[in-house]
Amino acid sequence: MPQSEPQSEPQSEPRPESASRPESEPASRRHPDRTRAAVVTGGSRGIGRATVTRLAADGLAVVVGYAGNRDLAEAAVAEVAAAGGRAVAVRADVADEQQVAALFDTAEAEFGGVDVVAHAAGRMYLAPVAELDLAELDALHRTNIRGTFVVARQAARRLRRGGALVTFSTSVVGLAFPGYGAYSASKGAVEALTMVLARELRGRDVTVNTVAPGPTATDLFLQDKDEEAIARLAAQPPLERLGTPADIAEVVAFLASPAGHWINGQVVRANGGIV
């Protein structure tokens, strides 16, 4: 039988090298001379304050978002400046779209852009479900759920390539402590949002993760707890102590750094092994 000539594959035009393979490293490594800047909500105290100073130690300029206590926010700015860094304080209700936009506007005007967002602002309310004050529940949702959506929306629009958004949940979501139903539910919503947003930002070279601290010695956590309750909570992790704001800030700094850029769409439980 006659043999047909083998058909050659159609030849395609060679693509430029930059188009032939995905970028293999984050933008923060490709532009090491660019000033990196962070927006930190809840930056005047607790975990937020520790995050401000830790990110500044890594060379980031920081916009310190705060809700009410200007003196504490300015003290955080002064601490950064004393160490040779750059920071500015901006008052913002995280549930207010215009005020949150102003945080990002300030970062862009003062520092050239936004590379890291650490959303540490939060509210806690404890009560058995049967005894919930629904007005308190609404206030909790406004800060913890709506506030996270408002901040995440700005971050999704304005983070530069190579950037990172770090939200905050709680390890109590896994522990299911009685009395924490409203608080845990609000933070469970944060975890769900974080997982979805990480996938929505495909192609942007931006990571989205949530940190879920365990019992941590902050004013927010310690309020309304007696010494016996605090000691009982401190004994529960295998490491047998409460976490510190600095412990949590180290995790945030890693997730925000080029070294942590391969971690994306995750809940990182920083809790000494309690769950």
Image (cartoon, rainbow, N blue to C red):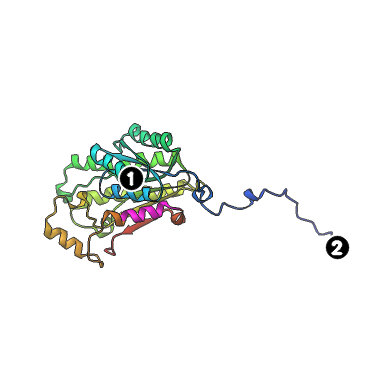
Residue under circle 1?
80
147 falls in the magenta region = no
**Mark 1 or mark 2: which is in front?**
1
Of labels 1 and 2, earlier in sequence is 2
Placement of the C terminus among the 4 image quadrants? bottom left
Placement of the N terminus among the 4 image quadrants? bottom right
Is residue 205 visible from the viewing direction of this image? yes
Measuring from the top left, give residue 107's x and y in whole percent. Answer: 40, 37
Q: Amino acid at mark 2?
A: Gln
- At a point 39% along the width and 52% down the height, the residue shown is 209
Q: Secondary structure at mark 1?
A: helix
Residue under circle 2?
3
Q: Secondary structure at mark 2?
A: loop
Q: Quadrant of residue 237?
A: bottom left
How far apart marks 1 and 2 lie (CA) works out to: 79 Å
252 falls in the magenta region = yes
Measuring from the top left, give residue 104's x and y in whole percent. Answer: 39, 37
Is 105 on the left or on the right of 180, as rendered? right
Q: Magenta stretch: give its range.
A: 248-257
Mark 2 crowd level (few <14, some 14–19, many ≥20, 10 Å Cα): few
Q: Amino acid at mark 1?
A: Val
Measuring from the top left, give residue 119's x and y in whole percent. Answer: 33, 45
Measuring from the top left, give residue 213's x and y in whole percent. Answer: 29, 56
